[in-house]
Image: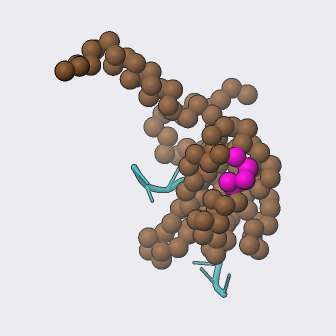
Chain colours: A brown, B cyan
Amino acid sequence: MMRIAPKFQCLTDLKSRFSTVRYNSQLFVSRLSFYTTYDDFRGMFSPFGNIKEAKLVMDNRIGRTKGFGFVTFETEVEAQNAIKALNGKIVQGRLIFVESVTNTKADGNDAPSES
DNA sequence: GTTGAGCGTT
């Protein structure tokens, strides 16, 4: 019955535009221990904010972690909070690095927030 | 307790 008018498609464009991550709230976590699992990985970032996305990069060849992952928080503040809390900390015997992400997979739509 | 710089599978 209800057809989507062409004028509403511009709203769809606006929606996809605003649903894009406008904050650099995504973190790159490296130097993780191989014993660190995904549950441990998410568990160490969860108390520092509302995690929107958490990834631990796995290797299909050996079926284990590559030793680094990515965490996306709801806000940039939570991300910076997690950096200050976890960057340079010893986790399971390994000193880990937590820093803002640099999209090498960027489609050209990565807009760093104004600082 | 298996090696150790790096930027990811949707």
Location of residue A66 in the rendering, given as x and y in whole percent from the top left corner: 56, 67
Please name the residue shown 53% across and 46% down the image: A104
Q: Left or right? Give the position of A11 relative to A46.
A: left
State the image quarter where residue A13 is shown.
top left
Please name the residue shown 49% across and 40% down the image: A106
Location of residue A26 in the rendering, given as x and y in whole percent from the top left corner: 62, 44
| Residue that sits furthest to the left in the current view | A1
State the image quarter where residue A37 is shown.
bottom right
Q: Which residues are magenta?
A: A45-49
Q: Left or right? Give the position of A38 relative to A85.
A: left
Quadrant, the C terminus of chain A: top right
Visible residue check, residue A40: yes
Location of residue A12 in the rendering, given as x and y in whole percent from the top left corner: 38, 23
Q: Main secondary structure of the magenta part?
A: helix
Please name the residue shown 70% across and 46% down the image: A49
Visible residue check, residue A67: no
Q: Reply yes or no: does residue A46 show up in magenta.
A: yes
Q: Left or right? Give the position of A89 relative to A56.
A: right
Q: Is residue A49 above or below residue A15?
A: below
Q: Left or right? Give the position of A110 relative to A8.
A: right
